[in-house]
Amino acid sequence: MRRVESEWQHLRLEASELSHPWAPAYRSLIEAAYAELTLRTLYPFTSHWALRFSTTTRPDLNPTGPCLTANSDGTFGVGRGFLTPDLGLFATPGEAVARAVRELSPGPSQLTDRLRARQRSSGTTQSSSPTLSTSHGERCQLRSQSQHV
């Protein structure tokens, strides 16, 4: 659980320190994804600056759901394939994140519902980050899983 939150914090820090022309769009995508509890329960990773999610942590990633990208033209892509926005191009990172969440099969969202219920019953608002043991959704073909560790 700590590894998931630690990786999210690493991605957020890395995004905040980038100086590329596309860095503001990338930062906003990372922050929008982090703000979505359903995605925050998954292990985030990047490859070629595409944001992906896994039901397990490194070194044995088990990718789930679509890839998200921040494009140089200010749009945000969501796709089933690596860097292929076949699920749409969006004007805002929030729209892209919402589309990505809709592509997840019931596994992660059911986990999120249980997590929210547990938080309500215990009176906590802090996110814990469990991982799943099985894959849900389609896999993207990854060329490099460890490029941006």
Image (cartoon, rainbow, N blue to C red):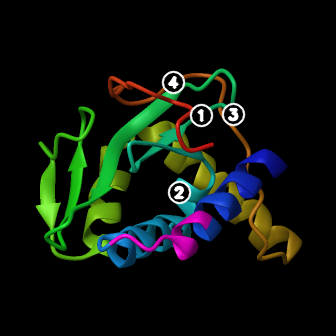
Identify the residue under disc 1.
55
Dot 4 or dot 1, earlier in sequence:
1
Q: Residues within 10 Å of mark 1 (few under 14, many from 20)?
A: many
Q: Quadrant of residue 141?
A: top left
Is 148 colored magenta in this rendering? no
Q: Residues within 10 Å of mark 2 (few under 14, many from 20)?
A: some
Q: CA distance from mark 2 to mark 1?
A: 12 Å
Q: Position of residue 61 (x, y in %)?
A: 59, 26
Q: Position of residue 76 (x, y in %)?
A: 23, 64
- The amino acid pointed to by label 3 is Thr
Q: Is residue 1 visible to us here? A: no
What stretch of residues is rendered in magenta?
Answer: 14-20
Identify the residue under disc 2.
38
Of helix, strand and loop, which one carries label 1?
Answer: loop
Q: Is residue 32 above or below residue 97?
A: below
Marks 2/1 in contact by CB < 8 Å: the verdict is: no
Q: Position of residue 96 (x, y in %)?
A: 27, 63
Q: Position of residue 65 (x, y in %)?
A: 38, 39
Q: CA distance from mark 2 to mark 3?
A: 16 Å
Marks 4/1 in contact by CB < 8 Å: the verdict is: yes
Q: Nearer the viewer, mark 3 or mark 4?
A: 3
Identify the residue under disc 4.
135
Q: Is residue 84 visible to us here? A: yes
Identify the residue under disc 3.
57
Q: Residues within 10 Å of mark 3 (few under 14, many from 20)?
A: many
- The amino acid pointed to by label 1 is Thr
